[in-house]
Amino acid sequence: MGEMKEKPSAVLIGDMVGSRLSADRTGLHDRLVATLAEVNATFAPVADLTVFAGDEYQGTFADVGTALAASLHLRLALLPHVDVRQGIAWGPVAVLAESPRVEDGPGWWSARAAIVEVEDDATRSVTRSARTRYALAPDVTGPETGAINAALLARDHLVGRLDERSLSVLRGLLSGQTQQQLARAEGISASAVSQRVRNDGLGVVMAMEEQLRGIR
């Protein structure tokens, strides 16, 4: 095995839900590449998300909070037409090769296991909206899984219920736009935006985002 990094990393692995059934896989791939570039730009210079096989992508972050935030931004950028399933883990990684760069190790293994677990969650009626899961690599000290996964279940449920306009409003709020600016952009009243923030749980998602992003 290659050199193991002394400091663990937050690893994110994801794939598109149901993409293998699409008649336009090239279009989906192009959209994923463009979306990853947007998320990398939003979280620059710490994001390095890239496609590694078809509809699958991966990247590493310095801390769990940033990886959790990036996973939400990425999902929102693709919804409502494309959804993703994502596994996040905190653990050591090993550099197997530099050119092209290839990494492996407990962080990656745990993130892959988290993908399998969230896929299994989605097969059960009570957790079918699950799309994101966090894992801690064995024998590693880091943010505990229980509270984070409880928050992710709630976040995924709220986001999965949003219609196209509420998704657009949430994306705007996360980018720093005010409700008045969003009302003008959406062609609706400020009170209509406020109602969506309140009734669709957008304010709750924003509050969760702030707290999850602060995890180190």
Image (cartoon, rainbow, N blue to C red):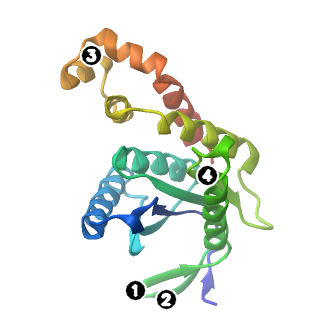
Instruction: Name which of mark 4 and mark 2 comes first in the sequence.
Output: 2
Instruction: Name which of mark 3 and mark 2 comes first in the sequence.
Output: 2
The alpha-carbon separation of the residues under discs 4 and 3 comes to 36 Å
| Mark 2 secondary-structure assignment | strand
**What's the residue type where badge 1 is placed?**
Pro
Q: Which residue is mark 4?
A: 122
From the viewer's side, name the closer residue of 211 and 179: 179
Marks 4/2 in contact by CB < 8 Å: the verdict is no
Instruction: Name which of mark 1 and mark 4 comes first in the sequence.
Output: 1
- Mark 4, mark 3: which one is toward the viewer? 4
| Mark 1 secondary-structure assignment | loop
Marks 3/1 in contact by CB < 8 Å: the verdict is no
The circle on residue 195 is none
From the viewer's side, name the closer residue of 92 and 134: 134
The alpha-carbon separation of the residues under discs 1 and 2 comes to 7 Å
Instruction: Name which of mark 3 and mark 1 comes first in the sequence.
Output: 1
